[in-house]
Image: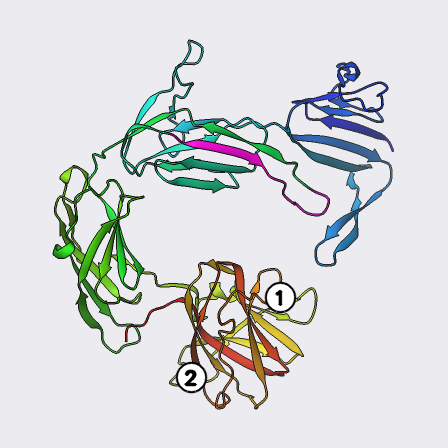
Amino acid sequence: MLSHQWVVSDDGTKFLNGKMEWGQTDYTNLIDESIPHTNDLKTIHVYFTKPGDHTVRLCNTFRRQVVYPYSVYDDNTGGYIKKYCYAKQEGDVYVMDTTFHIRVYDPNLVPAVKVYSDPECTQEIKTGIVGGTEEAPEYEKYELEYGKSVYIKDDSYGLPNKWTFKCADTGVNDELTSFDTPYQFTAKKFSDKPLLLSMTIERTSASEGKGKYTPKASPKTLVVPLAITVVPSDDPITYNIRQIDQTHIAIDLDNSEFGYKEINPSSLKLTYSNSYNRPSAVRGSVNITAAEVNKQSRYELILTLVEKIYNTDELTLTGTLTEALVGNQNLEIKATAPNVATTFGAFLDEDFENPDTYADWKVIDADTKTHPVVPSQVVDNPLKDGINNSAKCMFVEAFDRCRALLSKTFTGGKGTYTFSYKYYTPGYKQGKGMSPYFVPAGKEGAEDMTWQSNKPWCGIVNGSDSKWMSATTTVTSKAEMDNILLSMRFNAFKDNIYFDDIFFGYIEVRP
């Protein structure tokens, strides 16, 4: 070795020098202020005095090439893999430059926030202590228009990794596991008394890979020091209308509340138009029998319908609710186009004409532990017929002993879903089969059993060797779907198969 140099970040670090006693916890007598943060000592003892991220850099120079071996943990094999780091040649010498990144945690957390009136967080709102002192004035009394927001940035000490915001008056109960962007608190309740918004911070133990951990810290709570009173908005009333289920829709006000008078919905008119899987649209209207304000969230009005609607409908609501809002204001709903958002939604809805969707599907060897991935292939449609006349489709080569087709992952609620797809098997013979599964992401060998019917794929039927076949079925989830994917396992298939127009999601077809 020709030379070496230590470079230690200087904010919150000191060096220790001398003999340390057994069990010593106070290192004041060992701190050596004469040691610079850039030095060439053989060995250094760094004492961290502040929490946060620190760096320790070691730069060694050599006359000849050197190699440092090291090991990293591999999730696939469940063991350590040896790797090697080579010195970098710079002129006539070889340099081994290593930087250690160290995060130091304090066991004590101190919650603190900064509050702003704008999303860019340039206009800070003064905060302080209730009652106030000369050194710390009482917090600013802040008027917030209904439906508008203040923006909160975390200023806590101690590196928390979990934040919980609660406001009993407005029903807010939000949990964050990252605070990279400001928390947006939106006023959705009129109040002439200050709303109490509290923030609880804590540090939970989190696994970050083999040999890494985050030390826990007990929760600490802060009542956000800001007196927020919520006043009527000067803006025109705005709203959104959405389908709840097949017999209810809701009107959600953005910047006002419904009053306490009984609301008569007879002046409202709900019409529908539906052309889903039809040569021409069917049209009609649905009567509304009742209107009820949500007592916990008075910005929501729930309308009850006489007959069913369908999420493939195009729905239009019009009419005027007289003196229905706070202050006896009218709510006038005008529309020249459908204005009700339905629950129709697709987790998978792919026709394979768009190259961006190709990577959403993979083929794996279902019997191996590491599941090597084979990219799916999108090819020209080999047989255009009355069932499938599209230009492109997905091709799966299932000649190997046990292949499985995997979809992209998705997350969703519990409910009844529709699954439909088209397939063509040019070499099909009776006895070949497909086994359907829902599987957790990352555990492709384990079936997810939280379904009333856990096999949404229909089996292969005779005739699919000469034409495209279309299959549709439904499946009901008994629990929330959390990072679930669809898997199709080809058992002793030893053949090719083509897929197209794969759909998985909520769909209600009007009879």
Vertical position of residue 480 compared to residue 47: above or below: below
x, y (%) of residue 307? 23, 67
Q: What percent of the width, then of the height, locates residue 93?
A: 82, 36
Please name the residue shown 68% across and 22% down the image: 49
**Label 2 belongs to which residue?**
384
Q: Residue at x 33, y 69 (%)?
A: 508
Q: State left or right for residue 509 relative to residue 328.
A: right
Tell me which amino acid carries mark 1.
Answer: Ala
Q: Pointer 2: residues within 10 angstroms few (<14), some, or many (20+)? A: some
* Most common secondary structure along the magenta stretch: loop
| Relative to 128, residue 234 above or below | below
What segment is highlighted magenta in the picture?
A: 196-212
Q: Earlier in the sequence, mark 2 or mark 1?
A: 2
SS assignment at label 2: loop
Report which quarter residue 436 is drawn in. Answer: bottom right
Image point 50% across, 33% down: which residue?
200
Counting from the top left corner in percent of width and height, residue 135 is at: 45, 10
Circle 1 sits on which residue?
446
Name the spot of residue 492 as percent of width and height, x first.
64, 82
Q: Quadrant of residue 287?
A: bottom left
- In depth, the one of 25 and 120 nearer the eye is 25
Magenta segment: does it hold 203? yes
Judge whether 448 appears above or below 466 on screen: above
Q: Label 1 neighbourhood size at 10 Å, few (<14), some (14-19), many (20+)?
A: few
